Image (cartoon, rainbow, N blue to C red):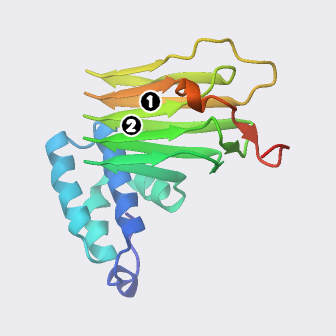
Amino acid sequence: MAQGPPDRLDQRASDRDRDDVLALLSDAAGDGRLALEEYSERADLALAARTHGDLAELTRDLGRATEHRLADAPLRLTALLSNETRKGFWRVPEQLSLRSVLGDCHIELQDAALTAPVTTIEARAILGSVTIFVPDGVEVRMSGANLLGASESRLRAAPLPGAPVIEVHARTILGNVTVRPPEPDAARSRPRAAGAGGR
């Protein structure tokens, strides 16, 4: 976390501040910059942190690139020993960051409004799972790396002409990232560009 003036470091941290640091620690574990034991220790401290200074100490040695990501972070969903879900109608930003550590994080896009022609999703699963529900016909491009884990797309149909593109960059450690169709009763619609007609 970026260093700041003493008065900033002494300010109370919010839940969002703690979530951002947890996501950065998860990213560092996925990149191999933190061992799982180190990640676990720092995550516990992040959850108990009271000030920005407490949080800064936890990311001080992770490099300037980490500090930059904290300042310009995309929408983040983090499931730490829990379940995190986003479904129904919601506006999907151009970039999303999904993290699951000993938990389950899933998003449903069949009723979502995409705000960009190409949506980029960074998905990290450490001893957990990330599931992205996408209706057939949407173009999904998957890439990434797995360490004793798996990432896969279970979409069956070819992309429709002019369909939105979803790029999924997956990284797993003893976890899995899966792109799959929604359940039959939830597959009534497909993601649309924001501002498009309809509901």
In the image, taking residue 32 as reference, residue 93 lies left or right, namely: right
Q: Quadrant of residue 12?
A: bottom left
| Extreme residue toward the front, this view | 185
**What SS does tag 1 mark?**
strand
Q: Which mark is residue 124?
A: 2
Q: Which residue is mark 1?
A: 170
Badge 1: residue crowd in 10 Å (few <14, some 14–19, many ≥20) = many
Q: Earlier in the sequence, mark 2 or mark 1?
A: 2
In the image, taking residue 124 as reference, residue 92 lies left or right, namely: right
Q: Which mark is residue 8?
A: none
Residue 74, above or below 156 = below
The answer to which of 123 and 106 lies nearer the viewer is: 106
Residue drawn at x 54%, y 38% as measured from the top left = 108
Q: Percent position (x, y) of residue 57?
A: 26, 66
Residue drawn at x 82%, y 43% as measured from the top left = 198
Q: Quadrant of the N terminus?
A: bottom left
Q: Percent position (x, y) of residue 76?
A: 48, 52
Residue 24, above or below 46 = above
Q: Amino acid at mark 2?
A: Arg
Q: Percent position (x, y) of residue 124?
A: 39, 37
